[in-house]
Image (cartoon, rainbow, N blue to C red):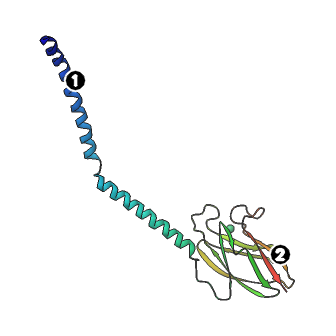
Amino acid sequence: MARRSASRHSVEAPATTGLPARRRVSPKAADKGGLPRWLRLGVFGAIVLVVGIVAVDLVIVRLQPPGTPEAGALQVHASMDGFDPDQLTVKAGEDVKLQLASMDTSMHSDGGGWHEFAIDALKVDFKVGPESSQVFSFKAPSTPGTYEFYCDICCGGKENPSMQGKLTVTA
Ligand SMILES: [Cu+2]
């Protein structure tokens, strides 16, 4: 009995001392390599804060029209969502001033933030660059009716424009 336990001891002893030793080493290494819990929480909080600020900033930039609206000019905002407004009304024969603004950034792969306001029947073709606006003018036709305007630059193009609207010419 005594011999057996002694021999068991001598056999098991290296194994038992070996295992805890290995276990003890790995947590120590992890503690040294990793950051303290409070610091990890702090870094996470800082990232959440920065991402939040950037998101709010992007929303504010999108809500603000690029450029100052010019008095007496019809305001048309163009973006990948379409024209805003997409219905315009003018008087026959009127000299129309139209301020076209692109609300999109140059980061857009589809057209690089450029948009167009074109009316084929009136030979109107205005283009505006990303996050900017420009005032254009054209003469409304003398005959009342409806004319379609569209953007040929972004998704769909001229054949199947996703950006289109109607210009109504009243008497
Ligand atoms: Cu467009």
Which quarter of the figure is the C terminus placed in?
bottom right
- Mark 2 or 1, nearer chain start: 1
User: Residue at coordinates 68% horizontally, 85% vertically from top-left?
Assistant: 73
* Foreground pick, 142 / 169: 169
Q: Name the residue under label 1.
A: 15
In the image: residue 88, left or right of residue 171: left
Tag 2–tag 1 contact (CB < 8 Å): no
**Ligand 1 quadrant?**
bottom right
Instruction: Count the labels in the image.
Output: 2
Q: How crowded is mark 1: few (under 14 residues within 10 Å), some or many (20 or more)?
A: few
Residue 138 x/y as whole percent: 75, 83
Tell me: 96 left or right of 24.
right
Q: Where, by quadrant of the figure, is residue 136 drawn? A: bottom right
How busy is the neighbourhood of tag 2: few (under 14 within 10 Å), some, or many (20 plus)? few
- Horizontal arrangement in the rendering, residue 130 relative to residue 6 (left or right): right
Above or below, comparing residue 74 to residue 50 in the picture: below
